[in-house]
Image: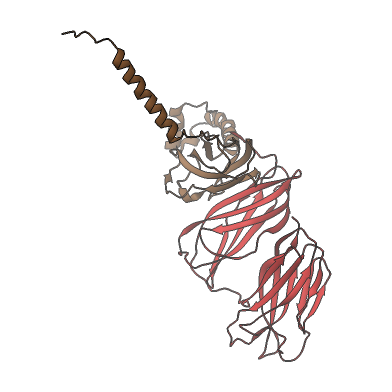
Amino acid sequence: MFLASRGEREAYSATAGGWRCNAIRRVRWIPLLVLMLQGTARAEPIKLQLAAPPIAQPGDVVTFEGTITNTTGVTLTASDLFLNFSGYDPSVFAFTQLLGVSDFVLPNNTFSRLLKLFDASIAVGTPTGEHAFSVELQDTFDNSSGVISARLSVESARAITPEPSSFLLMLAGVAGLAGRHKRSKFAKPRKRLD
Amino acid sequence: MAQAVAAGPNFTTRPPQVLNSGGRVSIALPFLNSGGATAHDVKLTSFTLGSAVRIEPVFPLLLGDVGRDNATAAKAIFSSAGLVVGGRYLITVRGTYDFNGSILGFTLNRYVAIPTAARSPISFLAASVTATVNQAADTWSYTVANKEAVESPRFVNAVSIDMQASFVVTGTPPGWIADTDNFSYVLWYVPSSGAPSSRHIAPGKSLGGFQIHSHAAASQGESYTVTSVNVQTGDGDRVAFGTTLGPGAA
């Protein structure tokens, strides 16, 4: 989008009278400015990126993590940010915002470390498969990340491997000891190397 | 994780209005349907402000349809006990809506700061209506409480409850009269008389015996209004507003 070099842009922003340079340059910049504004209108001033969640089971509480990019032009703090959820089956999900529980500061044109964003509680009895929901990040200034469609895979509870009984363990131990004793009794004496 | 404009309904909040007055924190959270379709039968199921105790409303509360680019508001009143002026608290509104025949959920979050306590511009009657629902008998029974100080001159003389399902009135306290269209409202009142009588609900007292019967499948929050008469002047006095349970759609 930018045809001017970085040096030119910096020079323009550094000098208050930069736009009064010459007519030719002004003509060259006007369409660019229009493009820039159109681009700004489309770009989301805050961006939310979700990390891939683990596979969940019914009854689990899954913590979603992610990063936030701030290009709003102002510094944001943790309590300036809110999450909205929609489009989910209320008999499957219950969402709890974690964002803001721990305070942080996110200056303009920076992105956050990996943050705990929200908990998704999966109802007991949730059928296996993928369950969809939408999440949107908003800030105090009504900037929005746009709606992000997400899915969470829910598997049935893992079959619990039965623990061998103590008796079986004891039998195995006795058998092992007996075998070792037998081997040592009938084994030929080893030659000493020294 | 795809990022796009929602084809279905999607809700986005707007700055909330917060009033701290008379030991109560009232919050109105506007929210906009920024999605691509109408959300039908939007129903609020909960509204929390940190760990504050909610006073009003009773949930679930039906807000109706919210069209694309249209806004509505979730309102609630909390006790200010335990809330710190200037402190920031997370408000969470949960609800459901109907989209293409499926009931879907939504959760809205927003941090609010508790403002300095202000004197309320309007004084309300201290009164409430509580409901007892007997699902087996399909009845909703109401008790009206006059919570004014005992020396208050305000006696309750009428209570009106909005309804959104067909019903019949099956209980009216002695000396009271019921007026209803059997679908959208019921009004119980004491017939007009000069001085308040024993039929009025005196300050510090409550009165039961208000009952309706409906075959509605579930309960939902409905608005009520309680009015009072001033025994010193004989004129109508303060009014109380709130929500209580009434018959509604499942």
Chain identifier of the red chain: B
**Count of number-bearing discs:** 0
Furthest residue toward left:
A194
x and y percentages locating residue A133 in the rendered image? 62, 40
Left or right of A69 in this view: B104? right
Vertical order, A163 against B58 (above or below): above
B220 or B153, which lies in front? B220
Along the line of sight, the residue nearer the viewer: B19 or B223: B223
Q: Which chain is represented by brown in the image? A: A
Quadrant of the image containing the C terminus of chain B: bottom right
The answer to whether residue B2 is above or below residue B12 is above
Q: Position of residue B62 (x, y in %)?
A: 71, 58
Answer left or right for B3 relative to A110.
right
Where is residue A27? Give x, y as percent: 57, 30
Can you tell which quarter of the image residue B140 is in? bottom right
Task: Pick whichever, A190 or A15, lies toward us.
Answer: A190
Please state, as top left, top right, bottom left or bottom right, where the N terminus of chain B lies in the image: top right
What residue is shown at x 61% (from left), y 75% (from top)? B122
Q: Is residue A9 above or below residue A108?
A: above
Q: Position of residue B169 (x, y in %)?
A: 80, 72
Q: In this rendered view, identify the residue nearer to me: A85 or A190.
A: A190
The way the protein has been coloured in the rendering is by chain
